[in-house]
Image (cartoon, rainbow, N blue to C red):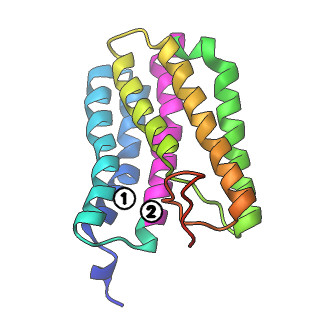
Amino acid sequence: MTISRYVTVPNVLSASRIVFLPLLYVFALGKMELAFVIAYALIGITDLFDGYAARRLNQCSELGKVLDSWADLAYYASSAFFMARLHMDYLRPNMVFLWVFFGLLALSLVVSAIRCGKPIFMHTWVAKTAAAMVYVGVILSTFLDTTVFVAVILAVYSLAFIEAILIFLIHGDVDPDSPSIFRVRPC
């Protein structure tokens, strides 16, 4: 196996979310909001293009799926920190929902680890919708009061994790790119 098999356009896009994530922390901790929102938008857009590139260039791989999942987890979980650091006023009224979100996330990873032998982060349509909402929500929070939108995001993400838990309990090990509980793809 050669290294070129692993260094593909989609894998580089996914890895870039992890590599550049510390830059977002620097901007958020320094309260450099304009630099943060520009970098957040640019880094986050790779989540849209990595999957598109994988399908378009026929470069889908198990490594790519795992890399994308971990990059998503790091990027979107970090978004909670960024919101807390830069826009706590919008997050504070939603703290109960935030703890439910993290609890369901942890439970979905534990259930998948028990049922499938590894933690799996599902990419169902509900999860993708929630991720897109987080992306837009963090950016909009720089310009608008997003308190209600944050509550909606946490509710949609909670539904995504409940769906994932049910998928693991009912079907066991499945393709993480299964579109929904109603259209589960086997591994």
Q: Amino acid at mark 1?
A: Ala
Residue at 53% x, 22% y is 152
Instruction: Say which of 158 and 63 sits in front.
Output: 158
Determine the image quadrant of residue 143.
Answer: top left
Question: Could you say which is closer to the camera, residue 49 or residue 90?
Answer: 49
**Where does the N terminus fall, quadrant-wise?**
bottom left
Q: Which residue is outermost to the front?
A: 182
Image x and y of residue 85, in percent: 49, 22
Q: Which residue is drawn at the image coordinates 60% and 59% (left, top)?
A: 120
Residue 80 falls left or right of residue 37: right
The mark that comes first in sequence, 1 or 2, is: 1
Query: For this view, does 61 lie left or right of residue 187?
Result: left
Which is more foreground, mark 1 or mark 2?
Answer: 2
Compared across the picture, whether 9 is left or right of 138 comes to left
Q: Position of residue 99 (x, y in %)?
A: 69, 29
Residue 43 lies in magenta, yes or no? no
Q: Answer with the quarter of the image where residue 174 lies.
A: bottom right
- Cα–Cα gap, marks 1 and 2: 7 Å
Q: Find residue 182 and report its horizontal and vertical position in percent.
A: 58, 53
Residue 121 x, y percent position in the rendering: 57, 54
Q: Secondary structure at mark 2?
A: helix
Q: Mark 1 sits on what residue?
A: 15
Count of labels in the image: 2
Residue at left offset 70%, top offset 50%: 165
Q: Say which amino acid is labelled 2.
A: Leu
Give me the disc on residue 67.
2
Does the rendering let one see residue 14? Answer: yes
Residue at left offset 44%, top offset 19%? 86
Q: Which residues are magenta?
A: 65-89
- Near mark 1 (Cα within 10 A), the count class, few <14, some 14-19 or many ≥20, is many
